[in-house]
Amino acid sequence: MVYYNPKEWFSFIFKIDKADTLRELFPLILAVSAYAGVVTYLLIDFWQLPDTSLLRKVSYIHQTIGFVFSLLLAFRINSAYDRWWEGRKIWGSLTNNSRNLAIKLKYLVNNTDAAFFNYMIPLYARSLKDHLRDVYVPEQQQFITIDQNKHVPNQIASAIIKNVYRLNKEGVINAEQLFSVTAEITSFTDICGACERIKKTPIPFSYNVFIKKFIFTYIMTLPFTWAFDLKYFVVPVIGFILFVFASIELLAEEIEDPFGNDANDLPLDNICENIQKHVGEILA
């Protein structure tokens, strides 16, 4: 995730970083701008179509669908941002629940069991991050043997609840304390399921394809109407319009799955580090 100062206007305007869509769109912008120049040459200089040409009437179509187009793009970016923000709230809940679980266990267990939970609680966050990114990052395992071919977060949650139940049977944790502690552990699995729901339920395919086709058709037909009025100035104008519309779609694609490694995805690595730091401070 890119961290920035929202008050630094000039750095935003004149600096192009890896998260800027201009980097990815620049070749396409050049191609479409060149296409607009060719269309203008054919209409104005080669065929020398008069101002009374029926192609001028196509502008009414663009005016009619322009408002609908803006609504579709607004809905696209808003729906993607909702998924991003929901993912952030879910991981915020994981952070809070990890702290709460560590605080509750701190005054219930001995040093040996505290070391177990001090390792396993942050491990759950790291394993969930890797699970959502479809990777498995091996690390030196303590207190547990993980089978990477199975659901890793579930294995860690099972190991945590197993030890809590053991402590209950040994009389270290009574029934009331058990109920309080298991509520936090159960929330881990709920959080995992919520993240999987976001990841495995993308924007409907037909809607996604329709937006791309709509943008392409809209941009490719603009030169046929604007060339009569703007002449060759239509070349940079078409490039700029493509940059605006395509950037909205690219940003929506990037943030609708907020658990990856893209520049605008959630800072899951930092969140996992904070969980490990805070749990360690509590259970140390």
Image: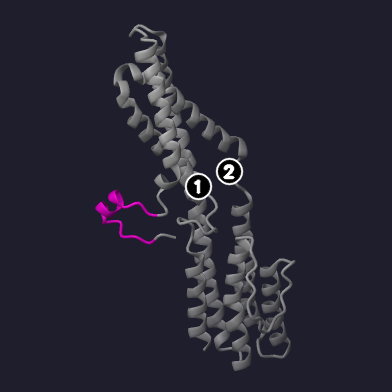
The verdict on residue 109 being magenta is: no
**What stretch of residues is rendered in magenta?**
3-17
Q: Nearer the viewer, residue 215 or 177?
A: 215
Rate crowding at label 2 as few (under 14), some (14 to 19) or many (20 or more) other CA atoms within 10 Å. some
- On screen, residue 50 versus residue 283, left or right, reads left
Q: Is residue 204 above or below residue 103?
A: above
- On screen, residue 245 versus residue 15, left or right, reads right
Task: Name the residue located 48 percent from the left edge and 84 percent from the top edge.
Answer: 281
Q: Residue furthest front?
A: 46
Task: Name the residue located 36 percent from the left edge and 35 percent from the top edge.
Answer: 240
Residue 53 place in picture, x, y as percent: 38, 8
Q: Which residue is mark 1?
A: 80
Rate crowding at label 1 as few (under 14), some (14 to 19) or many (20 or more) other CA atoms within 10 Å. many
Residue 67 place in picture, x, y as percent: 41, 28
Q: Residue 277, which numbered label? A: none
Q: Is residue 248 above or below residue 88?
A: above
- On screen, residue 102 versus residue 73, left or right, reads right
Q: Residue 203, which numbered label? A: 2
